[in-house]
Image (spheres, rainbow, N blue to C red):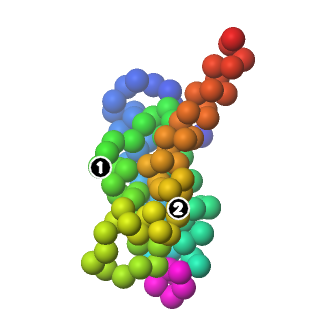
Amino acid sequence: MDFSFSQNQKVRKNILKTRIKNSQGALNKIYKLAKISRRARVLFSGAGFSKATWGHQTAGLSMQEWTKIEVAAANAGGFGKGRCRYTVLCVAYGPEGHPFVRGIKELFILWFKLILPMI
């Protein structure tokens, strides 16, 4: 695995760069499929989001990286250009499917899974 719990910023930066670089191909393919059919948006929910955010609970993501993920999700929504990103994300994925909300939800789930055995 290429994941580290290190607080070293250089290691963390390398992890984030490789994660984003490795997910761009899949996100572009999902975007191309979404141009053909709006049903392709489920591919982002299932695979694209997971690949782009793997390990974010411990390594973290900056707001710029979350914005990139939101743009990729909006592109995978199947709506044309010139749209409001927030509206597209809410319509396509629902209020609990918004990428940032999913990220926070996953963070709390992991946190409680780690804390409950300690109590």
Q: Give the quarter of the figure containing the C terminus.
A: top right
Residue sitting at x 53%, y 81%: 38
Residue in the foreground of this view, choosing between 111 and 98: 98
Residue 92: horizontal and vertical position, in percent?
50, 69
Residue sitting at x 33%, y 33%: 10
Q: Characterize the local packing of mark 2: few (<14), some (14-19) or many (20 or more) Cα atoms within 10 angstroms.
A: few
Against 98, residue 75 (above or below) is below
Magenta span: 32-38
Residue in the foreground of this view, choosing between 58 and 70: 70
Residue 5: horizontal and vertical position, in percent?
50, 27
Q: Earlier in the sequence, mark 1 or mark 2?
A: 1
Q: Give the quarter of the figure containing the N terminus.
A: top right
Residue 22: horizontal and vertical position, in percent?
47, 58
Residue in the foreground of this view, choosing between 51 and 114: 114
Residue wearing tag 1: 64
Q: How many marks?
A: 2
Residue 111: horizontal and vertical position, in percent?
58, 27
Q: Is residue 71 left or right of residue 114?
A: left
